[in-house]
Image (tube, rainbow, N blue to C red):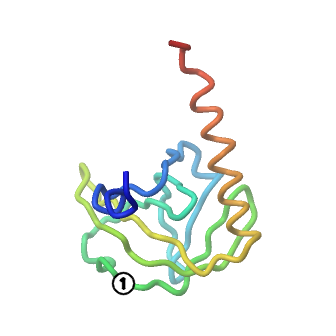
Amino acid sequence: MAANDKRESGRKFFRIPVDDPSKVSITIAAKHFNVVNVAPGGVGIYLDHADTFAQGEKITDIVLTIDDVSCDITGNIAHISPEDMYYLCGIELSDMNQETSALLQRFVDNHKASLFSCMPDF
């Protein structure tokens, strides 16, 4: 699959569902949002209203906290999609330093391993 094909399908990274809100949280402009999923390059959050952010909007005031480690980052709103009673908002993270990127990747790797460890062998 070519790089453009990945972009057209809407998925660049494997997403890890976040079941425990104490493990990952995000604050944007001093407002807390529930993190639904995490990928090496972004997070999914729930919004109450579709117009909270606009697709393509750059967000500069993000504090991402993973396992009690907080990081200041920026991001771009990749999509806003209706889902049940909320709107799922994908945020592509940018301007991460090496430590933040490594922290995010470690979280994804650790949780991906535990997700797949319970699957039967075929």
71 or 11: which is nearer to us? 11
Q: x, y (%) of residue 51?
A: 25, 77
Mark 1 residue element? loop
Q: x, y (%) of residue 57?
A: 36, 84
- Horizontal arrangement in the rendering, residue 52 relative to residue 99 (left or right): left
Q: How many marks?
A: 1
- Horizontal arrangement in the rendering, residue 98 relative to residue 78 (left or right): right
Q: x, y (%) of residue 50?
A: 25, 70
Q: Which residue is at a point 72% across and 55% down the rendered structure image?
A: 67
Q: Which residue is at a point 63% across and 25% down the rendered structure image?
A: 117
- Image height of 46 relative to 59, above or below: above
**What's under tag 1, amino acid-wise?**
Glu
Residue 113 figure quarter: top right
68 or 73: which is nearer to us? 73
34 or 100: which is nearer to us? 100
- The 10 Å Cα crowd at callout 1, few under 14, some 14 to 19, many 20 or more, is few
- Image height of 94 relative to 91, above or below: below
Q: x, y (%) of residue 79?
A: 31, 67
Q: Which residue is at a point 58% across and 32% down the rendered structure image?
A: 115
98 or 54: which is nearer to us? 98
**What residue did someone put label 1 on?**
57
Residue 26 figure quarter: bottom right
Q: Which residue is at a point 43% across and 61% down the rendered structure image?
A: 45
